Image (cartoon, rainbow, N blue to C red):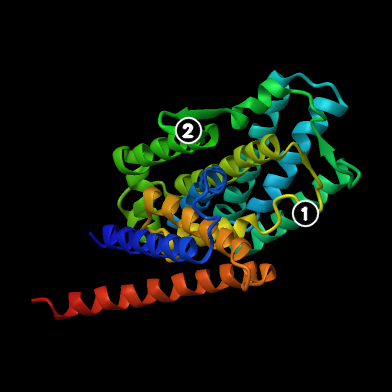
Amino acid sequence: MNGAKKIVGVFSLLLVTCVATSALSPYFLTSYNLENLLRRTSLFGVISIGAAFVIIVGGIDLSIGSVIALVGCLLPWLLVEHGVSVWMAVPGVLGLGLVLGLCHGLLVQRLRLQPFIVTLCGLLIYRGLARGITGDQTVGFQNEFKGLRSLVKTRFPLPGFEDFAIPSTFVILLIVSTLAIIFLRFTVWGRHLLATGRNESAARHGGIRTGRYIVLAYMISAGLAGFGGMLFILDVGSAQPADFGNFYELFAIAAAVLGGCSLRGGEGSVVGVIIGAALMQVLQNAITLIDWIPDNIQYAVIGAVIIAGAISDEGFRRIVSHRRLRSP
């Protein structure tokens, strides 16, 4: 019930933001803008779901943007510059994301290092590797591999809507989110992961091997970041390793927090995360479209959203605790 209230709240905020933006800019409701919003929401929704898994177990992943950069730059570097086949390059870069997540999880669980430190170091290392491997040069597909790029470039027209179509990235988001919902809500592994986030010590005493689920959460986060990196590079076609994916982890964390993921762990909703990702993209779109809002304040908005989410989470927790104490 509490999670449902949070989802209703963030969805209401999304509706209010959309109405306000459409009133202030005539371009917001155009077919081109709405389709672009849906495409970007889908891409950021994928990586936000990954970030949510780590937050649910009480951790944090600051390396998401750099994993996106490393995977996103490696894919065209392997395909175009070194002639590696698609059937080797794609599984290779996706597997790399999972391996990086495994390393994060083992460092956090086995060595008891702080998630902030582990993933912050990952942020620096993977960005440096992306720049070093590519020689800090722009990499891209150079009008090749159009079949592979159709994975994100395909559009599905809607009957009755001449200029609007559903981007294939939205279909990908639906698949990823459905699998995430099934895992979290309808499998024993998902229930154990949520229990680990709520109270790791109690879960361990209850027979749950909490370490495995913490490692799994980091693997899912980095794995979806790697998958997202592939989708992003297929979408834009080229990337500069110095700035590709910069601050994407902030968008992902903000979407997860807005969507109802408690920073204390043990609570989160995939549907809420997707709504949070949509809200972040609408806010960014509003900053771009509304003339009197400076474009360079978008990161200030993200920071304000994250702190507002943290404050509301703390306030909500105190209200619930107070009601429990007063109940007979």
Q: Relative to the observer, which residue lies in front, 306 or 15?
A: 15
Residue 14, percent across and down?
A: 41, 60
User: Residue 276: x and y, percent?
Assistant: 45, 57
Image spot of residue 322 (x, y percent)? 23, 80
Residue 315 is tagged as: none
Q: Is residue 23 above or below residue 63?
A: below
Q: Which mark is residue 171?
A: 2
The single residue placed furthest to the left in the displayed view is: 328
Amino acid type, mark 1: Asp
Q: Is the C-beta separation of discs 2 and 1 under 8 Å?
A: no
Quadrant of res 72: top right
In the image, residue 86 above or below residue 307:
above
**Taking 28 as reference, is 275 left or right?**
left
* Cα–Cα span, label 2 and label 1: 27 Å
Q: Earlier in the sequence, mark 2 or mark 1?
A: 2
**Mark 1 surroundings within 10 Å by alpha-carbon count, few (fewer than 14), some (14 through 19), many (20 or more):** few
Q: Mark 2 packing: few (<14 Cα in 10 Å), some, or many (20+)?
A: some
Which sits in the foreground, 66 or 285?
285
User: What residue did someone put label 1 on?
Assistant: 243
Q: Does residue 315 appear anywhere in the picture?
A: yes
* Label 1 residue SS: loop
**Image quadrant where one finds the N terminus:** bottom left
**For the residue labelled by badge 2, is the local secondary structure a helix, a strand or a loop?**
helix
Circle 2: residue type:
Val
